[in-house]
Every structure is written in structure tokens, then in C-alpha cells.
Image (cartoon, helix red, strand yellow):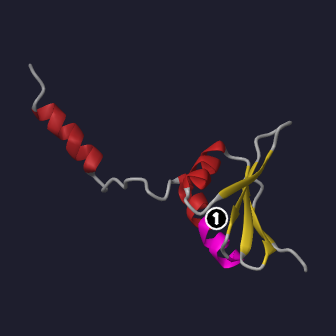
Amino acid sequence: MKTETIGDRSLSAWQVAPGVVWVQTRSPQSARKLSQRGDSRLVAQGVAGTYLRTFEFHHGLAWARRLIARYTRSGMATNARKIAPGSCARNSNHRKEHARP
């Protein structure tokens, strides 16, 4: 069976068996997010040299491709709060109006 690896050096995945993928990361932030998922299982971790964690998921490679796309899209957590455009300006004006002389 030829194994296709997707992703890059910091976050990658490959299929180890039908319906089972391993997702590997060198990023502590990505590892934290992956470990908090209910469907993940830590299967390997690096102990010498650089940071490395590998997680197992019972999903296909297409699922892993979407996961990597979400995790790498602009570095934002998937559950991060989005700030509406202009909200910073509105808050700074509010502070100026109520500032004491």
C-alpha cells in the first residue's frame, strides 16, 4: 500500500490503515488542540531533539486534509472569537468620550 502524506513539516497526516489516519505536529499549540479532541489518541511523541507528537484518528485522509486546512488557516483556532471590523475604533472612541478632564 502506497502511503500519501499531506500537510507540511509542522502539521502532516497519512493513512496507516483503511479508515485510520495519523496526524503529526511539531507545534505545541496544534498538539494541544489535537489532544483536546474527543476522537484523538496520542500514539507517539518525540523525546530527543525537536517537539513532535503523533495522534491517531478513525477517519479518512479527506477528513485529515480538511482538519489540516482548518488548523493552518491564518493560525486561528477553530473556536476563536472573531472581532467585527471597526469594533476596535468604536471601543477607542467610547473611551475618549468618557475620559476625565
Horizontally, is 92 left or right of 49 in the view?
left
Q: Is residue 63 left or right of residue 24?
A: left
Q: Quadrant of the N terminus?
A: bottom right
Q: Nearer the viewer, residue 5 or 17?
A: 17
Quickly name the residue at label 1: 68
**Magenta region:** 60-67
Q: Magenta segment: does it hold 64?
A: yes
Instruction: Tally the marks.
Output: 1
| Foreground pick, 92 / 3 | 3
Left or right: 68 with respect to 25?
left
**Which residue corresponds to the image point at 55% horizontal and 57% vertical from the top-left?**
74
Q: Position of residue 50 (x, y in %)?
A: 80, 39
Q: Position of residue 49 (x, y in %)?
A: 85, 36
Q: Quadrant of residue 39?
A: bottom right
Residue 26 on the magenta segment: no
Label 1 amino acid? Ile
Describe the element under mark 1 as helix, strand or loop. helix
- Badge 1 density bin: few <14, some 14–19, many ≥20, Cα 10 Å: some
Q: Position of residue 64 (x, y in %)?
A: 66, 70
Q: Pick out the residue farthest to the top.
A: 101
Is 24 or 92 nearer to us in this picture? 24
Q: Main secondary structure of the magenta part?
A: helix
